[in-house]
Image: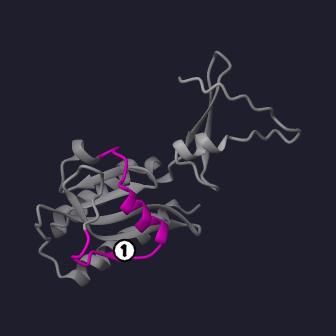
Amino acid sequence: MKATGIVRRIDDLGRVVIPKEIRRTMHIREGDPLEIYTDREGEVIFKKYSPIGEMQTFSAQYAETLYKTCSLPVVICDRDAVTACAGIPKKEYTDRKISAELDRIIENRSLYNANGHEDVFVVDGGAAKVSCAMPIITDGDVTGCVASVSVDGAQSGLAKDAETKLVQTAAGFLGRQLEG
């Protein structure tokens, strides 16, 4: 664990302010859920909570099914990193931080289709480009994204409308699974 040298007091309601510098560095936004852990030495640890990460096995199975039945390479990510993928190398993408461009697509809260004028990569330094992406929205909050991808210019054999509908359906379904 890394010491920051920052000390904060707990107020009368039990609240503590996480400094802006730490929130910025750790990509913690207003409204982000944090999970709280304690250990035997009395340490309290805050960790960003990822609802999509909690469903990693399920979302990986969903991605595999899309790839096997439709030959559609896909990634499923939370707000920070790829949590599941199929049709592209898992070791190169799973748990890697998403690119700033994909983060902007997620923030826009609407369907994205590549227009051929710009390349949006899933992760910085990766070869997979986003072809179509739909944010996963749960209880009105953006929790992640489902994206179809292409590698080395190879397109899926699907019509663009079919690809778009599959990505929208996956995002909608995963969003519903997370609502509680």
> Quadrant location of residue 152?
bottom left
Please name whichever residue, 103 or 167, is drawn nearer the observer in this view of the structure. 103
The correct choice, above or below, for 106 with respect to 163 in the image is above
Q: Position of residue 168 (x, y in %)?
A: 36, 75
Q: Residue at the location (64% across, 56% down)?
A: 31
**Is residue 173 within the magenta segment?**
no
Q: Position of residue 60 (x, y in %)?
A: 31, 52
Q: Residue at the location (25% across, 66% down)?
A: 119
Colour scheme of the picture: one colour
Span highlighted in magenta in the image: 94-118
* Tag 1 secondary structure: helix
User: Callout 1: few (<14), some (14-19), or many (20+) C-alpha neighbours within 10 Å?
Assistant: some
Q: What residue sits right under mark 1 in the picture? A: 169
Please name whichever residue, 66 or 134, is drawn nearer the observer in this view of the structure. 134
Q: Residue at the location (59% across, 67% down)?
A: 139
**Is residue 108 within the magenta segment?**
yes
Quarter of the image with the C terminus is bottom right
